[in-house]
Image (cartoon, grey):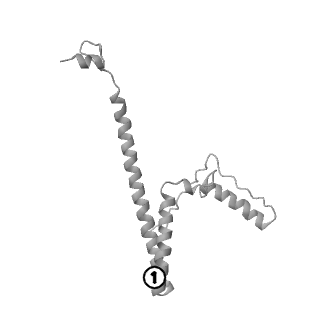
């Protein structure tokens, strides 16, 4: 028997056209380096504008969160009067999640229904103002409709 073993061929990894450039210089201060790194990570995550600060512009988010928070606090306080703090916390968290997600879903479904209604109206609107043509090619105006038998 021959003991020739075949070694796998060495394959070269493809080199990207524009490899990433890493900044290796530091400011000399660990805190300043962390601040610079966090700024880059934050920009990668949130983009140019700070989307966390723009949370109030998300449709249905404010109302569902406020309802969930209010319900969670109310249920937690009431349950805390009759049970341990751990049980009260569990009830508060569960009620917050149920009410928050439920109101979010209801609000989103209402928004979608309204959007579909608007789209249907926008599709039907041009059809209402189209001029009707007579078989001979002339426009049929309101007077022509009234004179027709």
Q: Quadrant of the C terminus?
A: top left
- Taking the spot 28% from the left edge, 17% from the top edge, the residue there is 143
Could you tell me residue 116's position as x and y percent? 37, 45
Q: Quadrant of the N terminus?
A: bottom left
Front residue of 66/94: it is 66
Query: Mark 1 — residue?
Result: 79
| Residue 10 seen anywhere in this rendered image of the structure | no
Q: Residues within 10 Å of mark 1 (few under 14, many from 20)?
A: some
Q: How many marks?
A: 1
Front residue of 87/142: it is 142
SS label for mark 1: helix
Q: Residue furthest right?
A: 28
- Taking the spot 39% from the left edge, 53% from the top edge, the residue there is 110
Could you tell me residue 142's position as x and y percent? 30, 20
Could you tell me residue 11's position as x and y percent? 56, 55
Looking at the image, residue 45 lies above or below residue 120: below
Q: Is residue 80 left or right of residue 48?
A: left
Front residue of 23/144: it is 144
Picture quadrant of residue 104:
bottom left
| Residue 16 seen anywhere in this rendered image of the structure | yes
Looking at the image, residue 142 lies above or below residue 2: above
Q: Residue furthest left?
A: 149
- Taking the spot 73% from the left edge, 56% from the top edge, the residue there is 23
Q: Is residue 79 left or right of residue 37?
A: left
Front residue of 76/35: it is 76
- Taking the spot 21% from the left edge, 17% from the top edge, the residue there is 148
Looking at the image, residue 23 lies above or below residue 146: below
Could you tell me residue 132's position as x and y percent? 29, 21
């Amino acid at each position: 028997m021959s003991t020739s073993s075949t070694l796998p061929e060495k394959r070269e990894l493809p080199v990207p056209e524009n490899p990433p450039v890493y900044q290796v210089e530091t400011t000399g201060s660990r805190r300043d380096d962390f601040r610079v790194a966090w700024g880059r990570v934050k920009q990668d995550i949130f983009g140019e504008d700070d989307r966390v600060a723009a949370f109030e512009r998300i449709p249905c988010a404010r109302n569902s969160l406020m309802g969930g928070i209010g319900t969670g606090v109310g249920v937690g306080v009431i349950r805390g009067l009759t049970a341990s703090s751990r049980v009260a916390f569990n009830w508060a968290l569960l009620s917050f999640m149920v009410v928050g997600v439920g109101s979010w879903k209801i609000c989103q479904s209402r928004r979608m229904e309204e959007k579909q209604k608007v789209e249907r109206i926008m599709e039907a609107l041009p059809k209402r103002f189209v001029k009707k043509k007579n078989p001979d090619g002339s426009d049929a105006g309101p007077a022509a409709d009234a004179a027709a038998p």
